[in-house]
Amino acid sequence: MKQSIIFFDIDGTLLSEKTFTVPDSAKEAIRKTQENGHLVFINTGRPILEIDDCIQDLNFDGYVCGCGTYIEFKNKELFHRSLGVNLSRQIVSKLREYHIDAILEGKNGVYYDNDINICSKEVLRIKARHINVGFYKGQTFDDSDIDFDKLVIWNNESSDFEAFHNEFENTLEFIHRGEDFYELVPLGFSKATGIKYLIEHLDIPHQNTYAIGDSTNDLSMLEYVENSIAMGNSHPLLFDLVSFVTKDVDEDGIFSALKHYNII
Protein backbone atom coordinates (compact mmCIF):
# COMPACT_ATOMS: atom_id res chain seq x y z
CA MET A 1 0.00 0.00 0.00
CA LYS A 2 1.41 3.40 -0.98
CA GLN A 3 1.91 5.88 1.85
CA SER A 4 -0.89 8.38 2.23
CA ILE A 5 -1.18 11.50 4.34
CA ILE A 6 -4.39 12.28 6.22
CA PHE A 7 -5.29 15.67 7.73
CA PHE A 8 -7.79 16.00 10.58
CA ASP A 9 -9.60 19.04 11.88
CA ILE A 10 -10.09 19.03 15.66
CA ASP A 11 -13.38 20.55 16.85
CA GLY A 12 -16.38 18.62 15.57
CA THR A 13 -14.15 16.22 13.65
CA LEU A 14 -11.85 14.49 16.15
CA LEU A 15 -13.16 16.14 19.28
CA SER A 16 -16.84 15.71 20.03
CA GLU A 17 -18.59 18.98 20.74
CA LYS A 18 -21.03 17.05 22.94
CA THR A 19 -18.60 15.17 25.18
CA PHE A 20 -15.42 17.23 24.52
CA THR A 21 -13.52 13.96 24.15
CA VAL A 22 -12.06 11.96 21.27
CA PRO A 23 -14.15 8.82 20.64
CA ASP A 24 -12.30 5.55 21.29
CA SER A 25 -13.05 4.46 17.72
CA ALA A 26 -11.21 7.53 16.38
CA LYS A 27 -8.20 6.77 18.58
CA GLU A 28 -8.14 3.22 17.24
CA ALA A 29 -8.47 4.42 13.66
CA ILE A 30 -5.53 6.82 13.99
CA ARG A 31 -3.36 4.13 15.58
CA LYS A 32 -4.19 1.62 12.82
CA THR A 33 -3.57 4.23 10.13
CA GLN A 34 -0.03 4.79 11.41
CA GLU A 35 0.55 1.06 11.83
CA ASN A 36 -0.33 0.70 8.15
CA GLY A 37 2.46 3.14 7.25
CA HIS A 38 0.46 6.31 6.66
CA LEU A 39 1.05 9.78 8.08
CA VAL A 40 -1.55 11.57 10.21
CA PHE A 41 -1.60 15.32 10.80
CA ILE A 42 -3.76 17.76 12.68
CA ASN A 43 -4.86 20.66 10.47
CA THR A 44 -6.55 23.31 12.58
CA GLY A 45 -7.26 26.99 12.96
CA ARG A 46 -5.95 26.78 16.52
CA PRO A 47 -2.39 27.89 17.29
CA ILE A 48 0.02 25.15 18.38
CA LEU A 49 -0.21 26.14 22.04
CA GLU A 50 -3.97 25.45 22.04
CA ILE A 51 -3.69 21.74 21.25
CA ASP A 52 -5.43 19.79 24.03
CA ASP A 53 -3.58 17.04 25.87
CA CYS A 54 -6.11 14.50 24.60
CA ILE A 55 -5.07 15.40 21.04
CA GLN A 56 -1.34 15.42 21.75
CA ASP A 57 -1.68 12.01 23.40
CA LEU A 58 -2.68 10.54 20.03
CA ASN A 59 0.92 11.02 18.79
CA PHE A 60 0.19 12.65 15.46
CA ASP A 61 3.08 12.84 13.03
CA GLY A 62 2.72 16.60 12.90
CA TYR A 63 0.57 19.71 12.98
CA VAL A 64 -0.65 22.41 10.63
CA CYS A 65 -1.86 25.17 12.94
CA GLY A 66 -3.25 28.67 12.68
CA CYS A 67 -4.70 27.97 9.22
CA GLY A 68 -1.32 27.25 7.66
CA THR A 69 0.74 29.84 9.56
CA TYR A 70 2.57 27.16 11.59
CA ILE A 71 3.78 23.72 10.44
CA GLU A 72 5.46 21.03 12.53
CA PHE A 73 6.65 17.50 11.68
CA LYS A 74 7.99 14.96 14.17
CA ASN A 75 8.26 17.64 16.88
CA LYS A 76 10.34 19.90 14.61
CA GLU A 77 9.09 23.31 13.50
CA LEU A 78 9.22 23.56 9.71
CA PHE A 79 7.49 26.88 9.17
CA HIS A 80 6.05 29.82 11.11
CA ARG A 81 4.72 33.18 9.98
CA SER A 82 3.35 35.82 12.33
CA LEU A 83 1.76 39.17 11.47
CA GLY A 84 4.54 41.15 13.14
CA VAL A 85 4.38 43.71 15.92
CA ASN A 86 3.42 46.71 13.78
CA LEU A 87 0.49 45.07 12.01
CA SER A 88 -0.61 43.38 15.24
CA ARG A 89 -0.77 46.78 16.98
CA GLN A 90 -2.65 48.29 14.04
CA ILE A 91 -5.26 45.52 14.15
CA VAL A 92 -5.74 45.98 17.90
CA SER A 93 -6.25 49.72 17.45
CA LYS A 94 -8.92 49.20 14.80
CA LEU A 95 -10.66 46.43 16.75
CA ARG A 96 -11.15 48.89 19.59
CA GLU A 97 -12.06 51.79 17.31
CA TYR A 98 -14.75 49.75 15.59
CA HIS A 99 -15.94 47.96 18.76
CA ILE A 100 -15.21 44.42 17.63
CA ASP A 101 -14.48 41.61 20.09
CA ALA A 102 -11.56 39.34 19.25
CA ILE A 103 -9.22 36.61 20.34
CA LEU A 104 -5.72 37.06 18.91
CA GLU A 105 -3.93 33.76 18.39
CA GLY A 106 -0.28 32.97 17.82
CA LYS A 107 2.50 30.49 18.34
CA ASN A 108 3.74 32.32 21.42
CA GLY A 109 0.49 33.35 23.05
CA VAL A 110 -3.20 34.09 23.00
CA TYR A 111 -4.17 37.72 23.60
CA TYR A 112 -7.40 39.04 25.15
CA ASP A 113 -8.67 42.54 25.74
CA ASN A 114 -9.60 43.65 29.25
CA ASP A 115 -12.90 42.10 30.35
CA ILE A 116 -14.52 45.53 30.67
CA ASN A 117 -14.04 46.01 26.89
CA ILE A 118 -15.51 42.62 25.89
CA CYS A 119 -19.19 42.51 24.90
CA SER A 120 -19.33 38.93 23.61
CA LYS A 121 -20.35 36.27 26.12
CA GLU A 122 -18.72 33.72 23.81
CA VAL A 123 -15.34 35.46 24.07
CA LEU A 124 -15.64 35.56 27.86
CA ARG A 125 -16.60 31.87 27.88
CA ILE A 126 -13.61 30.90 25.75
CA LYS A 127 -11.30 33.06 27.86
CA ALA A 128 -12.49 31.30 31.02
CA ARG A 129 -11.86 27.92 29.41
CA HIS A 130 -8.41 28.99 28.21
CA ILE A 131 -7.53 30.08 31.74
CA ASN A 132 -8.86 26.83 33.18
CA VAL A 133 -6.85 24.57 30.86
CA GLY A 134 -3.72 26.71 30.96
CA PHE A 135 -3.73 28.02 27.38
CA TYR A 136 -4.01 31.65 28.48
CA LYS A 137 -0.96 33.12 30.23
CA GLY A 138 -2.24 36.68 30.70
CA GLN A 139 -1.22 38.38 27.44
CA THR A 140 -3.37 41.42 26.64
CA PHE A 141 -4.07 43.73 23.73
CA ASP A 142 -1.82 46.30 25.45
CA ASP A 143 1.36 44.19 25.44
CA SER A 144 4.15 46.23 23.85
CA ASP A 145 5.53 43.21 21.96
CA ILE A 146 2.18 41.85 20.81
CA ASP A 147 2.65 39.61 17.76
CA PHE A 148 0.07 37.06 16.66
CA ASP A 149 -0.54 34.87 13.63
CA LYS A 150 -4.33 35.16 13.05
CA LEU A 151 -7.49 36.08 14.93
CA VAL A 152 -11.16 35.36 15.42
CA ILE A 153 -13.72 38.14 15.82
CA TRP A 154 -17.30 38.61 16.97
CA ASN A 155 -19.46 41.56 15.98
CA ASN A 156 -22.07 43.14 18.22
CA GLU A 157 -24.69 45.88 17.82
CA SER A 158 -22.01 48.55 18.37
CA SER A 159 -19.57 47.12 15.82
CA ASP A 160 -18.66 48.77 12.53
CA PHE A 161 -17.68 45.59 10.73
CA GLU A 162 -17.74 47.17 7.29
CA ALA A 163 -15.16 49.78 8.28
CA PHE A 164 -12.92 47.14 9.86
CA HIS A 165 -13.26 44.92 6.79
CA ASN A 166 -12.33 47.80 4.51
CA GLU A 167 -9.21 48.47 6.58
CA PHE A 168 -7.85 44.93 6.26
CA GLU A 169 -9.44 43.29 3.20
CA ASN A 170 -6.12 43.54 1.34
CA THR A 171 -4.20 42.03 4.27
CA LEU A 172 -6.45 39.39 5.79
CA GLU A 173 -8.89 36.79 4.50
CA PHE A 174 -12.24 36.95 6.32
CA ILE A 175 -13.72 33.45 6.76
CA HIS A 176 -17.37 33.62 7.80
CA ARG A 177 -17.88 31.05 10.57
CA GLY A 178 -21.32 32.06 11.88
CA GLU A 179 -23.81 34.89 12.07
CA ASP A 180 -21.44 37.39 13.77
CA PHE A 181 -18.33 35.21 13.87
CA TYR A 182 -15.33 35.44 11.50
CA GLU A 183 -11.89 33.87 11.37
CA LEU A 184 -9.18 36.15 9.95
CA VAL A 185 -6.05 34.71 8.37
CA PRO A 186 -3.18 36.41 6.49
CA LEU A 187 -3.88 36.49 2.76
CA GLY A 188 -2.14 33.62 1.02
CA PHE A 189 -2.37 31.27 4.00
CA SER A 190 -4.89 28.52 4.64
CA LYS A 191 -5.24 24.93 5.72
CA ALA A 192 -4.61 24.10 2.06
CA THR A 193 -1.27 25.94 1.87
CA GLY A 194 -0.14 23.94 4.88
CA ILE A 195 -0.95 20.71 3.08
CA LYS A 196 0.82 21.86 -0.09
CA TYR A 197 3.95 22.73 1.91
CA LEU A 198 4.02 19.33 3.60
CA ILE A 199 3.43 17.11 0.59
CA GLU A 200 6.18 18.93 -1.27
CA HIS A 201 8.49 18.69 1.75
CA LEU A 202 7.72 14.99 2.27
CA ASP A 203 7.43 14.12 -1.44
CA ILE A 204 3.97 12.59 -1.19
CA PRO A 205 1.85 12.43 -4.37
CA HIS A 206 -1.24 14.61 -4.39
CA GLN A 207 -3.43 11.61 -5.17
CA ASN A 208 -2.50 10.19 -1.75
CA THR A 209 -3.88 13.16 0.19
CA TYR A 210 -6.95 12.99 2.45
CA ALA A 211 -8.64 15.57 4.66
CA ILE A 212 -11.49 15.27 7.15
CA GLY A 213 -13.41 18.29 8.43
CA ASP A 214 -16.77 19.67 9.45
CA SER A 215 -16.68 23.46 9.22
CA THR A 216 -16.43 26.28 6.69
CA ASN A 217 -12.82 26.96 7.67
CA ASP A 218 -12.06 23.43 6.43
CA LEU A 219 -13.18 24.25 2.89
CA SER A 220 -9.73 25.16 1.60
CA MET A 221 -8.18 21.85 2.65
CA LEU A 222 -11.19 19.82 1.54
CA GLU A 223 -11.10 21.45 -1.90
CA TYR A 224 -7.33 20.99 -2.21
CA VAL A 225 -6.88 17.30 -1.35
CA GLU A 226 -7.67 14.41 -3.70
CA ASN A 227 -9.95 12.70 -1.17
CA SER A 228 -12.17 15.00 0.89
CA ILE A 229 -14.35 13.80 3.74
CA ALA A 230 -17.07 15.67 5.64
CA MET A 231 -18.31 14.54 9.02
CA GLY A 232 -22.02 13.77 9.27
CA ASN A 233 -22.34 16.66 11.73
CA SER A 234 -20.74 19.11 9.28
CA HIS A 235 -21.97 22.50 8.16
CA PRO A 236 -24.45 21.63 5.35
CA LEU A 237 -22.42 23.67 2.86
CA LEU A 238 -19.75 20.96 2.85
CA PHE A 239 -21.90 18.01 1.83
CA ASP A 240 -22.04 18.75 -1.91
CA LEU A 241 -18.36 19.72 -2.08
CA VAL A 242 -16.63 16.60 -0.76
CA SER A 243 -15.82 13.14 -2.07
CA PHE A 244 -17.44 11.32 0.85
CA VAL A 245 -19.73 12.09 3.78
CA THR A 246 -19.10 9.92 6.82
CA LYS A 247 -21.05 9.53 10.06
CA ASP A 248 -21.14 11.98 12.96
CA VAL A 249 -18.09 12.32 15.18
CA ASP A 250 -20.02 10.60 17.99
CA GLU A 251 -21.09 7.75 15.70
CA ASP A 252 -17.59 6.50 14.78
CA GLY A 253 -17.32 8.85 11.81
CA ILE A 254 -13.51 8.88 11.69
CA PHE A 255 -13.25 5.09 11.81
CA SER A 256 -15.95 4.69 9.15
CA ALA A 257 -14.26 7.15 6.80
CA LEU A 258 -10.82 5.55 6.99
CA LYS A 259 -12.38 2.11 6.60
CA HIS A 260 -14.27 3.34 3.53
CA TYR A 261 -10.99 4.34 1.88
CA ASN A 262 -9.18 1.14 2.94
CA ILE A 263 -6.71 3.16 4.98
CA ILE A 264 -7.44 0.80 7.87
Image (cartoon, rainbow, N blue to C red):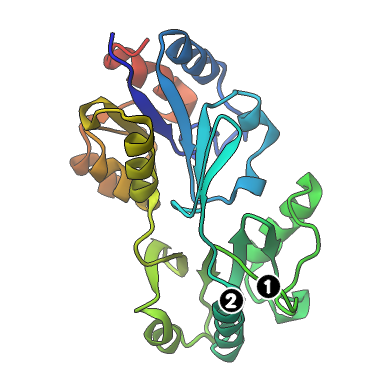
Residue type indicated by callout 1: Ile
When the figure is inspected, residue 24 is found, relative to residue 249, above or below; the finding is: above
Q: Is residue 218 visible?
A: no
> Camera-side residue: 62 or 152?
62
Which of the two discs, 2 and 1, labels the residue nearer the N terminus? Answer: 2
> Camera-side residue: 194 or 8?
194
Q: Quadrant of the N terminus?
A: top left
Give residue 207's position: percent from left, percent from top: 21, 28
CB within 8 Å, label 2 to label 1: yes
Give residue 198's position: percent from left, percent from top: 39, 38
When the figure is inspected, residue 170 is found, relative to residue 177, above or below; the finding is: below
Q: Measuring 35% from the left and 50% from the top, which residue is drawn there?
A: 193
Which of the 4 image quarters holds residue 177?
A: bottom left
Residue type indicated by callout 2: Ser
Q: Which residue is mark 1?
A: 146
Q: Measuring 58% from the left and 27% from the top, which residue is drawn there?
A: 22
Q: Is residue 42 visible?
A: yes
